[in-house]
Amino acid sequence: MSGSGPVDPVAPFGPDSALVARVVPAVNAEPRRGEMRPNLLVLHYTGMGSAEGAVRWLACAESRVSCHYVVDEAGAITQLVPEHMRAWHAGVSVWRGERDINSASIGIEIQNPGHEHGYPDFPAAQMKGVAALSRDIVRRYGMNSWDVLAHSDVAPARKIDPGEKFDWRLMHAAGVGHWVEPVAADASDFGFGEGHAGGDVLAVQESLAAYGYGVEPTGILDQATAFVLRAFQLHFRPARVDGRLDRSTRETLARVLAAVPSV
C-alpha cells in the first residue's frame, strides 16, 4: 500500500479493542511513517453537534481529518481507523521533539460541541467510556501515564481541547493519564504576562520543555510561551486558565515533574 494514499473507504477491518461497539472505516488514513509504533494517546473533543455527525465527517474524504475512535455521550465507542494505521487527528503538533504526532499516536475524539457552542460538561458515562478505552490502549502499548495527552498539549497555539472541563483527575484515578493535585491559585497573584523576561521564565520554559511541551527556553515570556502555559493550565490547573505565569502554575509544574521518574 502506498505511504501517502488513502485506504479503501469500504475496506472492512476488525476492532482493535473489545470495547468497540461498531466500526465505520474512515477514508483519510495511511501507514504510519517509518513503521512507527504508537507511543502517545491524544484526546480531543469533536467540536460538533452530535456524535453521529462527527463520525460521518471524520470518516469522509472531504473532511481531510480522521481519528481512531469516537466516544459518544453515553460512552459508546466507534472505531474509524485501525490502530496500526496513521489517522489525521493531530495536525501541526509537537511533543518531546517529535513533529509527526499522527504517526506516533492514537487519537480519540470525545463528543462535545466545544467552547464555541456552549461547552457542556462531559457526562459521567462518557468519561467512563473514555477512561476504559484509554486504559485498554495504554495497557496494550505499554504507555506511561504521562503519555496520555490533550490535543492542546501537542498543539498549544492552535487548540484548547478537550478543555478545562475534561476530568483528568478521574482519568488518573481510573488508572490512566497523568495528574497531580494543583496548587490553588491565589486571587491576588496575577503573575507575569507576555513581555516579562528573566530567570524565572527561563526556569519554567526549561521545565515545560523537559516534560515534553514544544517551547524554546529563551527567558522571555513571548506569545508562544503563553500558549504553552495555557495548555499546561488546561490540563493541570483548570480552575484558572489565563496563560500567565503565577506561583500556582510554577509550583504545580514542579509537582508534575516530580511525579515523572524520567524527568
Image (cartoon, grey):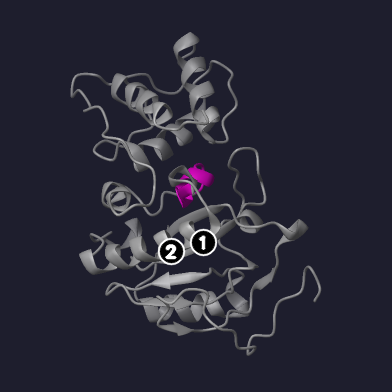
Image location (x, y in percent) of residue 122:
26, 61
Q: Choose top left, top right, bottom left or bottom right for residue 215.
A: top right
Q: Is residue 155 visible?
A: no
Residue found at the far right of this picture: 2
Q: Measuring from the top left, give residue 31's x and y in whole percent.
A: 72, 68
Residue depicted at x 18% and y 24%:
187
Q: Quadrant of the N terminus?
A: bottom right
- Residue beneath disc 2: 136
Name the residue: 53% across, 32% down: 224
- In the picture as drawn, the residue positioned furthest to the left comes out as 187
Left or right: 5 in relation to 103: right
Amino acid type at circle 1 is Arg
The answer to whether the residues at label 2 and label 1 have Cβ atoms under 8 Å apart is yes
Vertical side of 234 occupied by 34: above or below:
below
Number of residues whose C-alpha sits closer than 10 Å to that of mark 1, classed few (under 14), some (14–19) or many (20 or more): few
Residue at 55 percent across and 29 percent down: it is 209
In the displayed structure image, the side of residue 176 where residue 125 appears, left or right: left
Q: Is residue 252 magenta?
A: no
Q: Nearer the viewer, residue 103 or 178?
A: 178
Secondary-structure class at tag 1? helix
Image quarter for residue 7? bottom right
In terms of secondary structure, where does tag 2 sit? helix
Residue 198 in percent (x, y) is at 49, 9
Does the magenta portion include 152? Answer: yes
Q: Which residues are magenta?
A: 148-158
Left or right, 181 with respect to 138, comes to: left
Query: Residue at label 1?
Result: 140
Q: In the rendered structure, which amino acid carries the disc numbered 2?
A: Asp
